[in-house]
Amino acid sequence: MADWIAPFGTPPNTSFVNGDPDNGSPIPAEFFEKWQTWLLAIIDAAGLTRDALDDNQMVDAIQALIDASGFSIPALPDHAGAAADGDELAIAVGGVGGVEKKITVAELFLGRANFDQVARDQIAVANLRQIVNTSVTSSALVQGWQYGFDTDEWGVTSTSETFISGSPGYYASQAGTAQIAQAAGTVIGDMTGNGGNAAAFDGSTSQTLAACAQNTGSACFIGKNWGSPKTIAQFKFYGPSNSDPFGSSTPTLKLQGSNDGTNWTDLYSETLGGLLGMAWVKTVSAGINTSQAYTYHRVYLNGFGGSNAYCAEVQFFEVLTPANMTLLPPAPVTLSEVPPAAVLFFLWKDDSGAAVLGTDVTVELSRDGGATWTVATLVNRASFDGTYSVIRARADLSAQPSGTSLTCRIKTLNTKAQRIAAPAIYAE
């Protein structure tokens, strides 16, 4: 039977129309039958006695059915203030002896909170891009602060950091390189003519042919056995002060490393032009393979024919062990109200290739000016221009003493080379 009862003698689903007895819509008996059947079924289900004179009987029947179902909203405890995340809302269902269903305030608002966090992340990433791409200087945010690092603004309050100016400016835990003392290690080589191998490490960068280390063959080397592995990131080769170091030949200059003094690995290679001139100096600080440390390093030369090779001095520069930085802003951000939580966004680059968020770089947040710290949870939110990662560090500050002085502390740990740029701190 169709759900819609059409006028008598008309097709299914035909609407009723107004009219006179001859042209109006005839009402079928089923129409009256169905309405009465439906209404009486509700009264019967409620267990009431049908009473055609009781105009409120339908309302009474519906209320009786609700009461019989056991549905109720229990009274909630009174609160002096706002509901806490752990407070529960309860609904009893299933009639007498039914199950009471509960949901916490935190669960109730979880979906909205997750949506809010995604929106905040998007806004923060967009803000970082604007700061970096437009060279905007440090400036206030709503309940927060964005640091541009266009200057060494955290240097006074931080430790073991190296500030690198650029776009963006950043703090690095990599301390760079340092020259190894000329007396360090044991000299190795076959440039035994004139001043001999030792002349290449005597501290004098200006020497005549007669005082230089010399080799008359077509290939030679000069270097050091350090006694323990080192990573060389730069070297310098000094020619004699009164002559070309290789005559008119075009030799190949290489930096090589070894851990046994027999098997050598090329770390850098370059073919030199002829007639380099007097007092020639070759400085190599780029293009060196620094992925592995070696106990032996040497400068290897070949292809200079029958010309002599002369070396006044060789200097090696090693990669220093990265420092463990502690970065602090110069002053807390003053807020208008006590924050229950806070978040720090920043750009991060793992120069070591092995740093782990939360282990090798950590963030702590404070709402009482740094008297109390809470460790934040770090999440990699996005890639930034193929160089940096956008990191979000969030902490619940509700357990801290009440305060409106928001600040942060970033640490790099375990001597892993890393960079920190463009931090932005927000109250939630």
Image: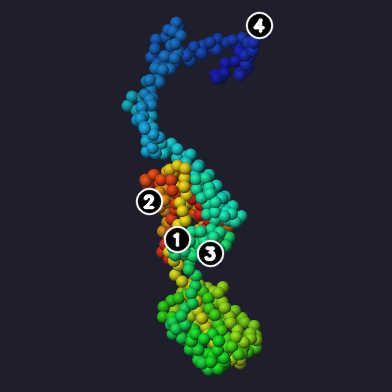
Q: Which residue is mark 3?
A: 164
Crowding at mark 1 (Cα within 10 Å: few <14, some 14-19, many 20+): some
Please indicate whether residue 122 sits to the left or right of residue 409 in the image: right
Which color scheme does this rendered protein use?
A: rainbow
Label annotation for residue 20:
4
Whichever of callouts 2 and 1 sits on the residue coming sooner in the sequence is 1
Q: Which residue is mark 2?
A: 372
The residues bearing labels 3 and 4 have C-alpha atoms spaced at a distance of 94 Å
Task: Identify which amino acid the numbered label 2 is placed on.
Answer: Thr
Whichever of callouts 3 and 2 sits on the residue coming sooner in the sequence is 3
Crowding at mark 2 (Cα within 10 Å: few <14, some 14-19, many 20+): some
Residue 108 in percent (x, y) is at 43, 36
Whichever of callouts 4 and 2 sits on the residue coming sooner in the sequence is 4
The residues bearing labels 4 and 1 have C-alpha atoms spaced at a distance of 94 Å
Q: Is residue 160 above or below residue 283?
A: above
Marks 3 and 2 in Cβ contact (< 8 Å): no
Secondary structure beneath label 4: loop
Task: Identify which amino acid the numbered label 1 is placed on.
Answer: Ser
Q: Which residue is mark 1?
A: 158
Secondary structure beneath label 3: strand
Whichever of callouts 3 and 1 sits on the residue coming sooner in the sequence is 1
Task: Identify which amino acid the numbered label 3 is placed on.
Answer: Ile
Task: Identify which amino acid the numbered label 4 is placed on.
Answer: Asp
Query: Which picture quadrant has residue 78?
Result: top left
Q: Is residue 54 above or below residue 5?
A: above
Q: Quadrant of the N terminus?
A: top right
Residue 243 in percent (x, y) is at 61, 90
Residue drawn at x 57%, y 55% is 137
